Amino acid sequence: MSVPLNERLYRTEAVVLSRMDYGEADRILTVYTPHRGKLRVIAKGVRRPNSRLGPHLEYFTRCQLMLARGRELDTVTGAETLDYHRRLRTDLDAYGHASHMVELLLRLTEDREENEAAYSLLTASLRLLDDGVDAFAVTRHFELALLGLLGYKPELYRCVACTEDLTAVPNALSNRQGGLLCPLCRGTDGSSFPLSVNAQKYLRTLDRHGLGAAAKLRLDADLRNELEGAVGGYLRHLAERDLVSLKVWHSLAQGG
Ligand SMILES: [Zn+2]
């Protein structure tokens, strides 16, 4: 957690989201932290073979960082691994899903915007992947929960146009309107597409009862593809928008 030591130095837990080589031996890292949100920091000399910091700053590592405030970027002065997440480096499937989750945080969150719940969601999800829990379920849960935490959760229970309760038919998902449309309102968004009853049921189960309940539902390959495509399309649509204005619109539309 984040504890101020003096005006220049501070300590924080962090997960390494991305890295970029810089200069001769440095790296610029983007990390996610519980109280400072997404942060870009510099680790000097970290690419030298004898660097003490290097081994603690790999992708997906959860670590304790000591940082010194800088004019542009804060500098890593100390690092200690808390969770190395070995499977995320050795299992291609786990690696792919972890990369996807990290990419979503990079694209959907603002720099230095605290969201402790999003940090907890990230660390819990990485741990589950590392423990070998079904990557599909862990990732869909991460996506939906992150959307909720950032204020972009798709409406799954009432039609986003007429606000009637939805029935068990293939309602259509509208990325533009932020949720499901009943069959009568489907025409209000020509780019919406029908979601099967089972796909809707899976998303509602994840939303209402969490990962444990959703993991008990049987999913065949078609349903997995449908869900991955639908949620992925929704996320892509969001990431391509002006997120701040969309957030305002969303909270107005939901009366929140
Ligand atoms: Zn409707």
Image (spheres, helix red, strand yellow):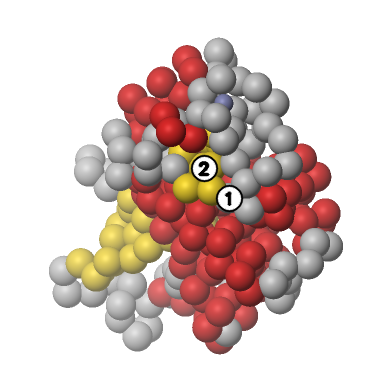
The quarter holding residue 62 reads bottom right
Towards the viewer: 200 or 194: 194
Q: Earlier in the sequence, mark 2 or mark 1?
A: 2
Indicate the quadrant containing the N terminus: top left, top right, bottom left or bottom right: top right
Q: Residue 17: image x %, image y %?
A: 43, 60
Identify the mark at residue 195; answer none if there is no mark.
1
Q: Give left or right: position of 236 versus 25.
A: right
Residue, x 47% and y 56% (percent of image)? 232
Q: Image height check: is 128 above or below 24?
A: above
Crowd around label 1: few <14 · some 14–19 · many ≥20 (10 Å): some
Question: Which residue type carries mark 2?
Answer: Leu
Q: Image height check: is 73 above or below 178?
A: below
Residue, x 29% and y 34% (percent of image)? 242
Q: Residue 188: image x %, image y %?
A: 42, 29
Q: Which residue is mark 2?
A: 173
Q: Is residue 211 visible?
A: yes
Q: Are marks 2 and 1 in contact (CB under 8 Å)?
A: yes
Element type where label 1 sits in the image: loop
Element type where label 2 sits in the image: strand
Q: CA distance from mark 2 to mark 1?
A: 6 Å
Q: Residue 117: image x %, image y %?
A: 62, 40
